[in-house]
Image (tube, grey):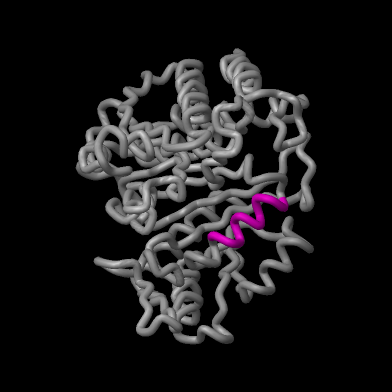
Amino acid sequence: MTAVSAIDTSTLRLGIMAGDGIGAEIVPVARQIVDAALSVVHAPPVDWVELALGSSAIETHGTPIPEETLDVLGTLPGWILGPHDSASYPAEFRDRLTPGGVIRKKFDLFANIRPAAAFEGVKSTVPDMDLVIVRENTEGLYADRNMVVGSGEFMPTPDVALAVGVFTRAACERIARAAFALATRRRNHVTIVHKANVLTLTTGLFRDVCRTVAADYPHVVVDDEHVDAMAAHLVRRGGDFDVVVTENMFGDILSDLAGELSGSLGTAPSINASESRVMAQAAHGAAPDIAGKNRANPTALVLSSAMMLDWLGEARSDPVLSLAARRIREAVRTTIGSGVATADLGGLASTSEFAEVLYARTIRR
């Protein structure tokens, strides 16, 4: 899942988009921490490319996702995407695919990787949770992923609404391989989540393709669960799971649940990746109610950026990038563990205060 092709690998040029809401506060923190970690491990600095997206792009370009932004992204191996608040856009943009959705679809970012792990110093329902949900990101039961044109939802009459779900063998196989490859770098355990007792053909195909791929990974323990049972298992015994692979909508729901059970969506990172590109994007939204108040928690986006560095390190066979990612994760862990946290985690630190401590721990020799 990390074979970079047709992209210049001689320098590390990365895109950065602030997005909406709290994006203007947390994206600069993520950038600062990435730069700091790279400097400590003596990696070349990033050539950041700032790109228009969201409400500000509507004002300057007449659209939340300008073509020139997409054109530049096509020349880059990775980028940081801040949250977007599509509900606040003018009416003509609200029913369109979100900016993140447009990017995901254009660059075939088929793997949404969402870790959920408890942090010392953060109250959690499942304190021993340490899992990764590998979510198929291009089709499944989300209608907006399934059409070349249109949303995949339609109404034959005003009283009947239908949606299209799509499962293809090719998409199921590539996400399964991403999950099993990840498991070999963790604890060699994959749980396949489906609803094949009811959605026999669609999620049944997903389950069966994952089982077929499992034969190529004989050292990985494989089990499977119905999605409703899996939700209960996460609450009751979330620490028993390692890598969870599932379809789009199930993955979205379960990853939010796992994030909250492990502590907070404010600490829940994620990347969206293809074979050649990676996008760091926190699992949470734009939080417009606290935007501009210096209260936002940058942890999830900072950790997402560390995941991006890990992906790029593997893609470019550059262990220094992975060292930088490890330094970021350790700085986050020790910062929160020391009691420095934003209000959503029960702390008293502002965004800027948290960022200041995190930066100091990142550059500490």
Closest to the observer: 96 or 264?
Answer: 96
**In the rendering, at what x and y percent does residue 33 appear?**
52, 23
Start-end of magenta stretch: 252-261
**In the rendering, at what x and y percent does residue 151 appear?**
34, 67
Closest to the observer: 311 or 69?
Answer: 69
| Quadrant placement of the C terminus | top right
**In the rendering, at what x and y percent does residue 96 appear?**
34, 57
Q: Residue at x 58, y 53 (%)?
A: 132
Q: Is residue 85 above or below residue 223?
A: above
Q: Residue at x 61, y 15 (%)?
A: 360
Q: Residue at x 54, y 60 (%)?
A: 252
**Could you say which quadrant of the image residue 205 lies in?**
bottom left
**Could you say which quadrant of the image residue 153 lies in?**
bottom left
Q: Residue at x 32, y 28 (%)?
A: 50
Q: Is residue 77 above or below residue 242?
A: above
**In the rendering, at what x and y percent does residue 240 appear?**
72, 60
Let me know if residue 43 appears in the view: yes
Main SS class of the magenta portion in the image: helix
Asked whether residue 14 is drawn in magenta, I would say no
Tell me: 254 left or right of 20. Answer: right
Asked whether residue 260 is drawn in magenta, I would say yes
**Could you say which quadrant of the image residue 220 lies in?**
bottom right
Tell me: 7 left or right of 351. Answer: left
